[in-house]
Amino acid sequence: MGPMIIFDKSFLQSLTVDEAVILDQMFSCVVTPLFFVETMADLTKETARGRSAEQVVGGLAERTPVAHSYINTYHQDVVLEDLLGRREEFDHRPAVAGGIPVKVEGKAGLVFRKSPEQDAFDRWQQGRFLEVERVFARQWRDELANIDLPSITKAWKSILRSEDRPKTHEAARDLARRAVDAGGQNYRILRMAHNLLGMPPRTLNAVVRNWKAAGSLPLREYAPLAAHCLEVDLFFELCLSNGLISDQRPSNKIDISYLYYLPFADFFVSGDKLHRTAAPLFMDARQRFVWGQDLKADLAALNSYFSTLPDEEKAKGLFTLASKPPIDHNGLVADLWDVRMPGWRTPKPPAPKMAPKAEAEIIARSRGLVDAASRSGPYSWDDGADVEHLVIERHIPKQRGSWRMFSAAVEASNDADGRNSLADQ
C-alpha cells in the first residue's frame, strides 16, 4: 500500500486505462465526493462527436481506483464534527465513514462494506445508470451555472480599497490566514466559520456550547479542519476581488473545493493550473503538489516496464507483481515513495509462506466478520474498546485494461465461492 494521494477528475481523464491501473497499484487513492459528483454530472454534459455521455462516464468509472482506494467522507460532514469538538487527527489519512462494529468469538472488529459510490462506479462501467443519477446531474449543472462569482467580487471590492486587495496568490493566502487566526476574536471567527462553511443553523447552539466547554479556544486549535476550509474559502474570495482568479468561470469554485481535502492525503495530483498555483499554499512540509502530466508520463513508463516482464512473472497477476515500484526505478513515482515510504528500496527477505490451515482460518474469520456485519443489530462497543480485526471489503475485477490482476490459483479459489470479482478482506 503506497502513499496517500488525491486526484481531480481532469487528471484521471488524462490517463489510459492501463496507466490508471498502475496508479491504483502504486498509491492509496483517496476518492473525494467531489470527484464522484463531477463524474456523475457528466451524464448531462455535451460530448465530443462519436461518444455518448454514458460512454464518457463509463470510461471514467473504468479508470477509477478500486484496489487501494478510500472514499473520503464529504468535507462538510467532517467539518461539522470538527466544530462540535469531536476532533480527529488530520494526519494525511482519509476520513472514511460507514464502519460497522461487530463482535465475533468475543473479539471486536470493524467492517467497511462496499460503499454506494463504489457500487455506482461498477454500474457505470457496465453502462447502467439510475434515473435519479440523471436528474441529479441536470440539477448539479443548473446549480453550477447559477454560481454568481461576480457578485462575490463586487462585495469584496466594496469592503477593500484597491490598495488593500492582495496582489499575489501568496498575499491572498496570508490575508486569509490572518483573518482566521486574528487574536481576541475567537467567538466571531467560530460564528463566521459556521456560517460561511454552510453548517446547518440548528447546530450553532451545540457548536458554541461545546466550544465554550473546551475553553473557548482559537478556531485553528479547536477545529483545525474548519479553520483550513475557512481559510481556503476566504483565499478564493480575496483572489476574486483583484482578478487573481477569474470570476467568469463558475467551475473555479468547484476546482478550489478540492483543496478542502488536502489534510486527508500526502500528495495532490492535478493538471489544473489553478490547483498548481493554489494547492501548495495550503500544504504542509510533508505534502507535495504533483503536476498531472509528469505523473502520467511515469505511470506510462512503469506500465511499459511491467509489460516487458516474462510471462511467468505476469502470471502472478498485477496485484502481486506491482505492489511497489521497481527498486532501481528513478522516476516520479519512486521519488514520491522515497518521500513518504522511506526504506522501501531496501531489499527484505521474502515472507515465509503461510500454512494452508492458517490461511484458511484467516479467510474464515474475515468472512465471519462480514457475515456479522450483514446481520441486523450490529454489536455496539464502548468507547475505547480494542479493535482486534479490521475488514475492508473491496471488489476488484479479475481483468483491468490489459492486466490480469490475480493468479490463476487465486481466481480459481474465488470462482469456487461463486464470485465474479475479488473481495480484499
Image (cartoon, rainbow, N blue to C red):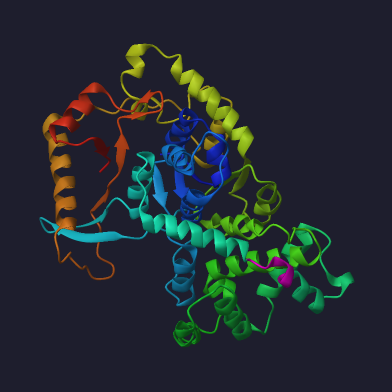
Screen quadrant of the N terminus: top left
Q: Is residue 179 left or right of residue 221?
A: right
Which residue corresponds to the image point at 68% horizontal and 80% vertical from the top-left?
A: 183
Look at 58% across and 71% down and name the residue there. Answer: 220
View extreme (right): residue: 163
With respect to residue 407, does 383 lie above or below?
Answer: below
Quadrant of the rendered image containing residue 284 = bottom right
Q: Position of residue 371 (x, y in %)?
A: 14, 52
- Residue 326: x %, y % from top left: 48, 24
In front: 358, or 241? 241
Residue 337 in the image, given as x and y percentages of width and height: 52, 36
Most foreground residue, 413 or 174: 413
Image quarter for residue 312?
top left
Percent across and percent down for residue 290 are: 62, 41
On the question of residue 381 being in view, the answer is yes
What's drawn in magenta, residue-wise?
A: 147-152
Residue 389 is inside the magenta segment: no
Residue 295 in the figure: left or right of residue 214: right
Q: Is residue 358 above or below residue 158?
A: above
User: Where, by quadrant of the figure, is residue 318 drawn?
Assistant: top left
Number of disc labels: 0
Name the image quarter holding the C terminus: top left
Our reading of the magenta stretch's main secondary structure is: helix
Residue lying at 89% horizontally and 70% vertically, measured from the top left:
163
Q: Residue at x 61, y 82 (%)?
A: 186
Residue 107 visible somewhere in the drawing: no
